[in-house]
Amino acid sequence: MKQDIILAGVGGQGILSIAFVIDSAALKEGFQVKQAEVHGMSQRGGAVQSHLRLSEERIFSDFIPRGEADLILSVEPLETLRYVDYLRPEGMIVSSRTPLVNIPNYPDLETVLGKIKEVPGHIIIDSEKLAREAGSARTQNMVMLGAASHFLMVKKDDLVEFIGVLFETKGESMIAANIRALELGRQAAEPQGGT
Amino acid sequence: MKTEILLGDEAVALAAFHAGLTVAYSYPGTPASEILEYLIKLAEKHGHLKASWSVNEKVAYEEALGVSFAGKRALVSMKHVGLNVAADPFMNSAITGTNGGLVLAVADDPSMHSSQNEQDSRYYAQFAQIFCFEPSNHQEAYDMTRRAFDLSEETGLPVMIRLVTRLSHSRSTVQPRQARGENELNYGASRDWTLLPVNARRRFKILLEKQPGLVRLAEESEFNRLELNDRDRSLGVIASGIAYNYVMENLRSRDTAPSFLKIGTYPLPEKLIRRLVDHVDTVLVVEEGYPLIEKMLRGLFGIPGKTLRGKLSGDLTLSGELSPELIRPALGLPGLPRRELKGFEPASRPPQLCQGCPHADTLIALNKALESSPRANVFSDIGCYTLGAYPPYEAVQTCVCMGASVSMAKGGAEAGVSPSVAVIGDSTFGHSGLTPLLEAAAANISMTVIILDNATVAMTGGQPSYASGERLVRLIEGVGVPREHIRVIEPLPKNLEKNVEVIKEELAHDGISVIVAVRECVVEARKRKRRA
């Protein structure tokens, strides 16, 4: 069993937090993990992505080969589209519909969402709305992790455990908001909840 | 010991700590910064370990050399272009030799994700004639660093660990081993460490005499592995470092693998290469960075009777990072089927200055002050403000290397550029801008240096800056810039008009002037408030 996931978003959206939670859960469950990140210049409001690979067997490449990703998990819809060519033909997308507009030529949102919908296995989530419902607009990343949790080879309970570890220093209310965000995202992506 | 998930950089750091490290030094630079970041965290927990940021890479290397002289173990880490700055002590440290183990971890940035070039540090190891490890994964990064300290003491030479972005900034599991204690204080012999010609000639001969021994160490190293396929002699693959992973990723699903030599050390294991080449018809060399191995194999005339393929033959790209899919054609494999976005090209999203960044206010004021100076030139430097080259600012015209803004503005002024302006950050100024300012002030060159003092090394994640605040102003005065031409401004939108006036006045001054724009980095300000 293996799973290759592209995490996508814009610098500052908490891609690496999603990665930390999945990585830690995978290690606990005895899987092999490799996860390539973007640091440095791109973190300043640029496009960021992380290649996350889980497997029962030895993983060689830190990069997912183009054409082998099982899932794109994205916190921003335009960023989702940047990595579609990493998907294998049956690969799926779990994407936010909340745009982060920090460039002058951001395309029409409906066109962007339309392109995502061309991929047969897609789930589009209103992460901003659910994050606010969870108590903090900054929890959109955990909403998206929750939405993708149906399809991950790690257990949801372990994700919850490591959200606790991730936000340990930020206090109980921050941990609770992030776990709520995970649960709301998960509910929204139930088979009847997707679009 | 417990298995941990670590960045490649962190695996090197942890291994150095477990190897009995006494002190670590570095200057921030992507993708190497996380090595010292991790050691600083370890030092906070373990009182005996020291880890601190240096003012630049040359200083870092020399500090590490001082530790080695005293018989203790030192780690010095930097990005690839940082080694250009540290090249002087680096080259000479192979001549003095080491006393306590000295390991240099240098992280290359193929594809130039956060760099001005993609130079290959393996050439530096070859140039200095020292041993170099090139890990392919996190466990090797740990194991090789552990080994590197012992090997440094066994050979009496510094040892290089060559990393690349894809390993430095990738996370995976590492199984650490039992930690070793620190070395005792034990000074080096002055006849070896005083490189007067008489000593240097003797020491250089010793370095040359050590070379065959280094090749033997490479041939015996567990990190170089040869696997010969006796049934199929058509192809042999030589793969080094991270490139090994990309080859294995593609061979995973194949029933029969070609003959294979995995390279993890330099100098190259000559006998193993000879055995592989003798065994096959075609040799494919896959390496991240420049075609160093391929060039050595090819020499001037190639290998008689054999086909050599790689970057020089055009089978692999000469620039940019490799990836699993990029090397498939060279292995004779078809492309993988994949999804495609038809008729849609996602708009690019380049990095940019943060909302509320003080640099933006300074650059806007500078642009306004220069409106009536069509022949002005703004020389700039390495830092977040380099993003001011992009629209909407388009405020700076050069970015070459640390400190070059000040030196180039002086050269430009002497060639007739007017106004000649340098824009440089506080930490970059401390790194390499101070010395050219000393020179420009002594000659009272007609130029204006704008120092953006945000009190941190922002681009690499907020490491401390030494040339900041009051100390910075005193430094500028100390090198001889007249007090009346050192102007301090606060870059805020509400101060725009005032700041434009100050800049205009100094641009009009026929002599050296320095404007210090002081406002804290917004990211660091936010972090500070969260901590409080």
Image (cartoon, coloured by chain):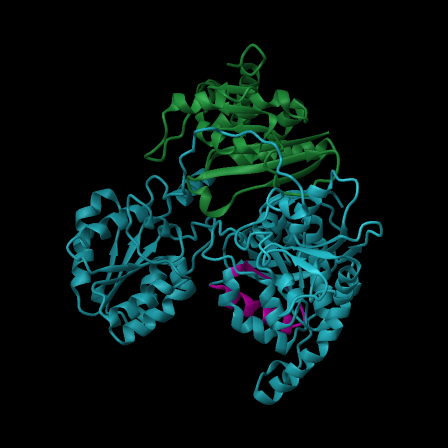
Q: Could you say which chain is coloured cyan in the image?
A: B
| On-image quarter of the C terminus of chain B | top left
For image coordinates 68% across by 32% down, the residue present is A26
Query: Could you tell me residue B424's position as x and y percent?
Result: 34, 58
Residue nearest the viewer, comparing A63 with B27: A63
Please say whether residue B427 is one of the residues in the magenta stretch: no
Residue B12 seen by the camera: yes
Q: Residue at x 64, y 72 (%)?
A: B129
Instruction: Pick the residue in front: A89 or B151.
Output: A89
Q: Residue furthest right?
A: B230
Please tell me in which quadrant of the rendered image residue B92 appears: bottom right
Quick check: B48 left or right of B259? left
Q: Is residue B523 above or below residue B455?
A: above
- Which color was chain A given? green
Residue interval drawn in magenta: B56-80
- Up the image or down, B196 lies above or below A182; here it is below
Task: Tell me, yes or no, if residue B454 can be seen here.
Answer: no
Q: Quadrant of residue B403?
A: bottom left
Q: Position of residue B280 (x, y in %)?
A: 77, 57
Is A89 positioned to the left or the right of B446 in the image?
Answer: right
Furthest residue in direction top, as rendered: A192
Residue B211 image position (x, y, % from top left): 71, 75
